[in-house]
Amino acid sequence: MSSLYARDKAVWISFTDKRGHRMRRATGYTLKRTRKDAAGRMLWPPEALQLQKKLDANIVLGKWEFIEQKKTSPLFTSLLEEFISHRSGDRSAGTIRNYRLCAKEFTGVLGNHPVASYAEPELLRFRLQQLNKYSDHSAARVMTTLRTIFNWAVDSGYIEHNPVTKRVLVHPRPVPIVTFTDKELDALFEHLHTKDPDLERQLRFLWLSGFRSGESCSLKWERIDFDDRSIKHWNAKETRWEAYPIDKELIDLLRMTPRNREPFVFKYRNVCTVSHYTNVALADLGITGRTVHQLKKTYVKNLIRAGLSEAETHRLSHHKSIETTLKYYAEFDLSKLRKSLAKSRRPKKDVTIRSHKKALESSTPPSA
């Protein structure tokens, strides 16, 4: 059987489908005021009660065709809660928090209205306001999140098309890929060797493996197989388990790491803590414009310098899209392209005349 409940003055319906999964859907109706009968039971709108009867009659089928014909679309906040309830199983807590922050920014500017009332011109104005207020990257993140939420509204039948079209999305300007130099890395590791050896080992691991700082914080000893020379880790970008190969240098580093913090490998298990102490060490050395994530960028550049192909670099760098990997190749090959361009400007020698002179010299007998 199904049940009705209220959330943010919106009427929701909860039921169990034929697979035994508990489902929640917004009915599209709102409560102007809360009313109860003499027994203390909630008085629901007649339309919502009629919808509940339809659902109970078709509960065995597990279909929602009859509810998709509702006239009123839910409020944006109700749609957001429905979207999060269905995405919480395969999304991290940080991603869910990002959904809520972007939605708060959106409703703070355009208001909390039914999803069908938002039009593309409003989203264009909202995009321009975001560009004036934040950086290109932050504006792009908000617009991409909104497009994902409105896509859910389209799939659920609340709206016919997504008002956040692709031309509304913000494409950030290309930012040059900044990496650590060998001199900077030597100075950083030498400084941390006396100040904080635990952080030095963790940063060396990031530099040698290409792992993200969050992946190193959650790394456990049970995931490391020294016999197979591999690490089984969870790729947060592609949401899957992967086996990462390790070489002798990484094996030596891991064997030198003390096991006094089992089951975890490293001391620092918070991304913000690693970033903070790294920034403090860089500030002591007078190194500016560097972050922890640039250790991964340095790792990718080293793979390219070693002559690895695009596919091998993509596999070892854990990038979700190969386009991200190709950006490194495009920037890295810029110097080679410049040399090739300069080479093409050189005057060409007349190979025919030179070859003819050599032939004449070889055919002329030596003088007595």
Image: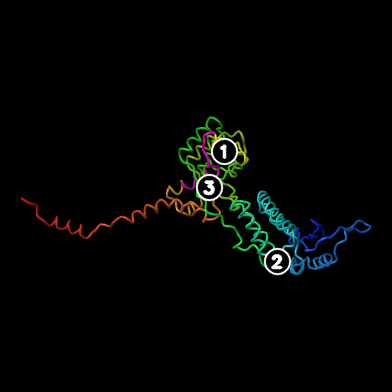
Proximity of marks 2 and 3: CB atoms separated by less than 8 Å? no
Q: Which of marks 3 and 1 is in front?
A: 1
In this view, the residue in front, 234 or 283, is: 283
Residue 51 drawn in magenta:
no
Crowd rating for badge 2 (residues with CA inside 10 Å; few <14, some 14–19, many 20+): some
In space, the residues marked 2 and 3 are separated at their CA atoms by 44 Å
Q: Give the range drawn in magenta.
A: 284-301
Q: Quadrant of residue 22?
A: bottom right
Residue at the farthest left position: 368
Task: Name the secondary structure under disc 2.
Answer: loop
The kind of residue tagged 2 is Ile
**Whole-percent x and y of residue 223?**
58, 44
**Whole-percent x and y of residue 70?**
77, 68
Classify 51 as above or below 348.
below
Q: Which residue is drawn at 66% across and 54% down?
A: 90
**Label of residue 159 in the image:** 2
Residue where numbered disc 3 is placed: 244
Classify 256 as above or below 135.
above
Which secondary structure class fits the magenta region best? Answer: helix
First of labels 3, 1 by sequence position: 3
The kind of residue tagged 3 is Tyr
